[in-house]
Image (cartoon, rainbow, N blue to C red):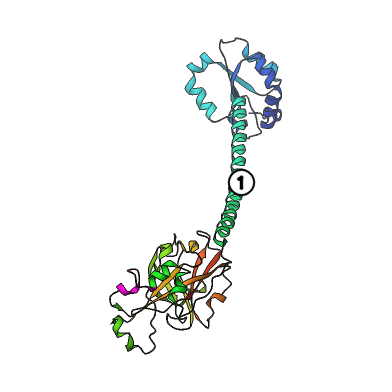
Amino acid sequence: MASNPSCDRLKVVEAIACRLTMLRQVLPIKLLVLCDALSAGDGNGSKETRLVVIYDNPKKDDADQDFKDALELSGLEPRLYSLDEYAVNKREIDAIVAKGMVLYQEGGVDRRRRMGRTWKRGLRWMGNGLVGAGLAILLSTGGYYAYSYYALSQIEQGVDGSLAQYGAGSSLEEAQSVSPMLASFLAGSPDSATVLGPETTASGDEVSREESTSNPSGVYTATRMIIPSIEVDSKIIETGIVFEDGEWQWERPKNAVGHLVGTGNPGEPGNIVTSGHISSPQRGEGQVFKRLPDIKLGDVVILYTPVRAFAYQVVAKKVVLPTEVSALNPTPDETLTLITCVPDFIYSHRLIVTAKRIGQSL
């Protein structure tokens, strides 16, 4: 069959696009499909190449000629069907249309507009979502710093104060003027060590109070800590330095107070350094010092060894950065240091509580 260069695919598509409005005025077009060779991109048109047009009822006898006149494109034989004719020849027409290219479908423009609106709406929601996420991050960051500032300010209230330091040998009257709890302890109340039975040393040997003279120095490692004012009653575990997460850290005892090996012991000059968790939500290691920020100047801390109990009175509190390690330094007198991370859930600083030995040990 002779080729018809004037009937190539691009020209057909351009002609339809330019005259679509006029074609729709001539016929109530429902569907317009370019079929056969031209729809596949073959530039050779022929009378076998069909432009399938389905239009609304009723059938018009001069529909073919009217459509050709409006299209003004030679070499292309349109096949026009009313909806009733389409219903009769549906299988044949559907087979032709399935292989063609849809140039117009009634409602298609509206659907594209709706799709455009839906896409724009989706982009708008996505943009709003990103803005919301950004605001959430900013608010959470602001909340983080606000909580940190507030918590630290609450902890730091009154921590700059100091209390007169009472050394070993202070009288009961002096102690009573500072702390009724300490006076009760020294007087041998049921809260004191006088009610304790025999305890064991770190090696597991049972030691009674009467057998304390077997240790010439009378110095033992503390095994228990009680702070009545903040309801702490915990065993004490010896802790060392371990290499973890790429750096050297203290061991973290579970549900216990840790005593740093190499620091002082009750009954001798030196700095007894202890630490405990304020909380441990990830590792589940307890919160033995949960209320340590509530401790007040003058409160009493009691350390128990297997044979004796020693009382210490809080004389100072301060909040420092983790890089501040002077609290670990040895002291010339008997000092008890308690350390925990603050504020809770942020752990950006360290709370240092200092207590001094007061009165005679029991």
Task: Name which quarter of the figure residue 256 lies in.
Answer: bottom left
Q: Compared with residue 231, is residue 315 higher up or lower down, i.e. above or below?
A: below
Q: Residue 263, percent across and down?
A: 47, 80
- Tell me the element at label 1: helix
Instruction: Name the spot of residue 345 as percent of width and height, x first.
Output: 50, 58
Q: Is residue 5 magenta?
A: no
Image quadrant in which the N terminus is located: top right
Three-letter code for the amino acid on which mark 1 is drawn: Leu
Q: Pointer 1: what residue?
A: 135
Seen from the viewer's position, the closer of residues 27 and 336 is: 336
Q: Please name the residue shown 52% across and 29% down the image.
A: 98
Q: Image check: 17 left or right of 342?
A: right
Residue 145 location, quadrant: bottom right
Where residue 197 appears, as percent x and y from the top left, is 28, 75
Residue 165 can be seen, yes or no: yes
Residue 335, image x, y percentages: 49, 77
Q: Residue at x 38, y 71 (%)?
A: 185
Depth check: 209 or 182 in front?
182
Viewer can see residue 287: no
In the image, is 214 to the left or to the right of 319?
Answer: left
The part of the chain drawn in magenta is 186-195
* Chief secondary structure of the magenta portion: loop
Q: Which residue is most to the front?
A: 173
Magenta segment: does it hold 187? yes
Q: Nearer the viewer, residue 173 or 345?
A: 173
Q: Residue at x 42, y 82 (%)?
A: 267
